[in-house]
Amino acid sequence: MPAWAEINNRGNRKQEEGDLDGAIADFTKAIKLAPGEHAPRYNRGNARSLADDVDGAIADYTDAIKIAPNFAPAWQRRGLSKQRHGDLEGAIVDLEEAIHLAPAEPSAYGERAALRALRADFTGAVEDCVRALALAPLDWHHRPNTQNLLDMIRKAEEKQRTETMAAKKAGTKARKAAKVEEAPRTARLVVEEVLGASGFTFALAEDEAGYIDYLAAVGQGIVEAFAVRLSEELERVVVYVIFEPKAKKELRTELAEFVTRANFGMGDGNFEMDFDDGSVRFKIALDYTEEPLSPLLLRNMIFDAMDTTEVYADALARVIAGKAKAKTAVRAAEKAAMESGSL
């Protein structure tokens, strides 16, 4: 085996163990030894992405594509990195090229489905979900996320059709009435206004205790969805970020350590874990007693939760998958966030 390949493989092992700095150093050595090989550049892009160096990851994926333009994974990974930069158009272009090069790979369809949903292209998102589920094996890791996204979109579309018909009927009645009273600006209306303006598709449910739950599909990495739980009677709102998959039983102690270490010193919100089923979520709560809930307050809660979970999401994914230890993963995530100024 060539020297560069041995060093490249060593970098892969270090990455699996959570030693991202060591992995990046090995991939860099391999690149110097074999500047015409795309593999170490692609692998360094993956390591940089896990370390939240999105710009560096995009640069490596771009170099890998220049060397091997038919290497679909590099297009797919670059698309996901562009998405993290907020470049949804560029992300979709890259994912489309990945699909063109590897039309039987289900993950690119699933990732494009999530992007299309964010851009309110629900028809395209449904088509991609259906295609991904048809291509993927039954034990495909992303099958639950993709199925959940498909179910969420279909429920939301049905809800939208129902609300549109109801609105038309209400509009007809209003035009016939001599005077229409303006509806009060309740906390419920504020939540629905913010979610609607953000372009999220959400499902709504109410329970007997008076809580209203809004669930919006996200489908980015291990972030499956986020939820807003509202009690107008208690004047309290909670935002949850929900992760998928759940941790296996033998990994839950390690995951509990991750949650504890990540929570220590955290200013806003906290991670929480269900030890019985291995599920993890992040939450931020607000008691708005005697102070009307405003769109700005709710938007700040949602963005704060998303920003915080972005710092830890990749590290959390590695611990859930059993590829990293809690202490190493948390330190690497917080170090990268400090260096980038996001923590």
Image (cartoon, helix red, strand yellow):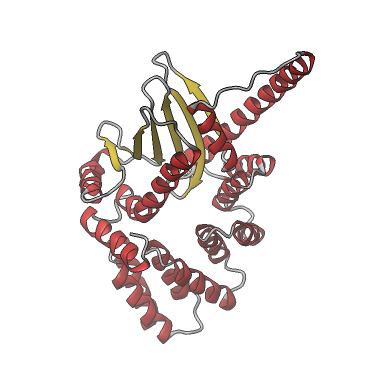
Q: In the drawing, does residue 163 fall left or right of residue 34?
A: right
Q: Position of residue 254 (x, y in %)?
A: 22, 47
Quadrant position of the N terminus in the picture: bottom left
Residue drawn 45% across and 50% down? 221
Q: Which residue is found at the position 49% from the left and 32% from the top?
A: 215
Locate residue 176, reporting x and y percent: 79, 14
How far across and how far down the image is residue 328, in percent?
23, 59
Judge by depth and name the residue closer to the eye, 124 or 289.
289
Compare residues 159 and 320 and report the one nearer the observer: 159
Q: Position of residue 227 (x, y in %)?
A: 44, 34
Residue at 40% x, 48% y is 304
Name the image quarter holding residue 184. Answer: top right
Q: Is residue 274 left or right of residue 154?
A: left
Q: Quadrant of residue 79?
A: bottom right
In the visual, does 238 lie left or right of 274? right
Count of numbered circles on the image: 0
User: Relative to residue 212, is residue 296 depicted above or below?
Assistant: below
Q: Residue at x 60, y 43 (%)?
A: 117
- Quadrant holding the C terminus: bottom left
Report if residue 300 is visible in the image. Answer: yes
The extreme front residue here reads 179
Viewer-proximal residue, 55 or 184? 184
